[in-house]
Image (tube, rainbow, N blue to C red):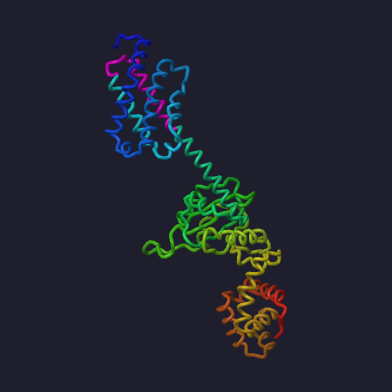
Amino acid sequence: MAAMTKAQTLAWLRNISGELATETLKRLDDTLPWYGDMPPSRRSAVGLVAQAGITSFISWYDDPRSQAWIAADVFDAAPRELLRSVSLQQTLQLIRVVVEVVEERLTNGPATLREAILLYSREIAFAAADVYARAAEARGLWDARLEALVVDSILSGEYDNELPSRIAALGWNGHGEVCVLVGTAPRIVDVDQLRRAARHVDADVLIGVQGNRLVVVIGRALPRGEEQAGERSFSFPQIAEALEPSFGPGHLVLGPEVPDVVDAGKSAKAALAGFAVARAWRNAPRPALADDLLPERALAGDPIARATLISRIYQPLKQHNTELLATLWAYLDNGRSLEATARELFVHPNTVRYRLKRISEVIGWDATGSREATILQTALIVGAIADPGANARR
């Protein structure tokens, strides 16, 4: 065989190509357990790839310069779903088996043929890596488009029955409550760094860029009550602080908690409204809570902020005890002076202190703090406007 011309070698290779393919399939079945576990259709597809590899080698050996990348054509015979069911490692194992079968058959062949096999096996390995790299890139681009679509749906509030399945397709690991964080997008958004920062605080995120805004939907990766021993779950403000470095300069606003990612639109609306008016709060922290921006949002015409102020401050005080509502009015109108409030209400200053403490217990805001006093006074104003029977002086 060593004295055979190249034309004779090609004729001989074409004559035994069927035998090589048959021997390859048998060797695959004997040496690769994952091949034997595949359904018949997938086994057939793998067999087509192996046979195409042998045929492609013969064509490449005939004229290596005419089709320098003919090795890439080997994978054209494989159906698209084969790339999702056969890993790159398994593909390289497949190439190794094909090369071993061919090498054993050509042990006594010309040296040039053995060198061609080595060179071709290298090319086919690089071709396999290229195919999988392109598939991974396409999947990454598809995931990015799908994630952008999901975030757009959350921000617009235009939900459909497909939203939960789209979120699941992105590998969302969030459990339970969700918050939305809105800030300025940096010049280059480092999505990978943002996801790493989220994982460090046991959170999962959905990321979207809306013009100059970076929107992040945050969910806890661990369900409540399933924290590791000795560890506690992170609060959403703590998670937001961990993500803060990934945002550009400017204000950063965290929306309120909502029960599930499907309801994230409510948190997003509050966060977006807070982000739009955050510059009106001179000492706004970073991140700031959307609920701490209720006065600015209400003044800007946000109906959600007005409704929140009424439902969480004005109405609870009115329904609990009218004396508390009257005391809060008087206390804020008198510049938060205990003595002036006591004189107006004809009570002792200690009574005013007690009522202020009860107010804090009922609504969760402390009227003695300057920022919280602004929130409470705004709530009284919008509540009185919405309440035809309101009377500030009782």
Instruction: Quadrant for residue 226, please give it.
Output: bottom left
* In-image side of 158 versus 226 (left or right): right
Left or right: where does residue 7 sit relative to residue 257?
left
Residue 333 appears at what percent x and percent y?
Answer: 70, 79
- Residue 298 image point, x, y percent: 68, 67
Q: Which residue ends up furthest to the front in the rendered image?
A: 40
Q: Which residues are magenta?
A: 106-129
Which quadrant, please, contains the N terminus? top left
- The image position of residue 219, as x and y in percent, is 50, 58
Residue 370 placement (x, y as % from top left)? 63, 73
The residue at 40%/40% (across/down) is 85
Front residue of this view, candidates 107 and 7: 7
290 in relation to 355, above or below:
above
Q: Is residue 122 magenta?
A: yes
Q: Is residue 212 left or right of residue 123?
A: right
Q: Residue at x 64, y 49 (%)?
A: 211
309 to the left or right of 242: right
Q: Hey, which quadrant is residue 375 in on the image?
A: bottom right
Q: Quadrant of residue 306?
A: bottom right
Which residue lies at the image location 43% right of the left edge and 59% below the top edge?
A: 222
Instruction: Name the residue rendered at 37%, 64% in the picture.
Output: 230
Q: Specify the quadrant that holds the C terminus.
A: bottom right
Relative height, residue 141 to residue 358 (above, below): above
Per the picture, the main secondary structure of the magenta-coloured stretch is: helix
Residue 153 within the segment the image draws in magenta: no
